[in-house]
Image (cartoon, rainbow, N blue to C red):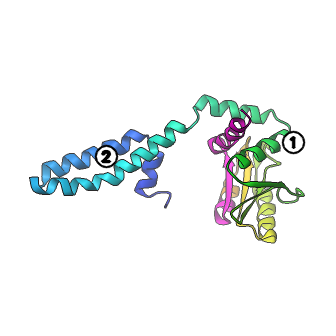
Amino acid sequence: MAPNSGFAILLRSPWWVSFAIAAAIVLLCGALLPVHLVPFAAVGALPVAVIGCIAAWRQWRAPSAARVQAALQEAGNMPWRAFADRLERAWRAEGQQVQRTDGRGSDLRIAKDGRVMLVAARRYKAASHGVEPLRELQAEVQREGARAGVYVALAGTVSENARSFARDNGLVLLEGDALATLLLKAEAETT
């Protein structure tokens, strides 16, 4: 799905927005169309209502902002080995196979259904994240023939050049809420 399509925007919006739009479609159909056509035209609101249900389900299952912040703070206090172990457990909880690599351009190799991704996570606490570690990851992705690369950034800022490089080369920047959600999966796996 395109990131700026109407449905993608509704999935990122609060769940009630979709239901309000669906209700508006039904009301407009009732107000503007002949009575015998209203039920058929109102069916057009169904996809928007389904998106509202999906958004509600996702938002209900999402961790609270306090829990996300606590997970990020806890990860920031971890040494590298503990952080790498937590990442491994999280991806295994998602059904991925995880291996440590030699650490040249990547630190972890995750695979599922024959698709391989390389993860660079060792600089997770860096104050700033520039293009150079992303170049190393991209070179490793090409050398290994992996499907994609994931760069983990817990602390600091990712420069605009690094974001552009990642976008242009199909690398995923794992940071903020997405990283916290992944780390919380490892926590849930141990309990």
Residue at 67 percent of width and 40 percent of height: 185
Q: Residue at x 57, y 32 (%)?
A: 64
The residue that mark 2 highlights is: 21
Give the numbered dot on residue 163. none
* Span colored in magenta: 164-191
Q: Quadrant of residue 67?
A: top right
169 with respect to 6 (left or right): right
Q: Nearer the viewer, residue 8 or 53?
A: 53
State whether residue 54 appears in this view: yes
Residue 177 in the image: x percent, y percent? Answer: 62, 41
Q: Nearer the viewer, residue 37 or 73?
A: 37
Q: In this figure, which residue is indicated by the disc labeled 1?
A: 81
Residue 174 is covered by the magenta coloring: yes
Q: Is residue 64 magenta?
A: no
Q: Main secondary structure of the magenta part?
A: helix
| Labels 1 & 2 near each other (Cβ < 8 A) | no
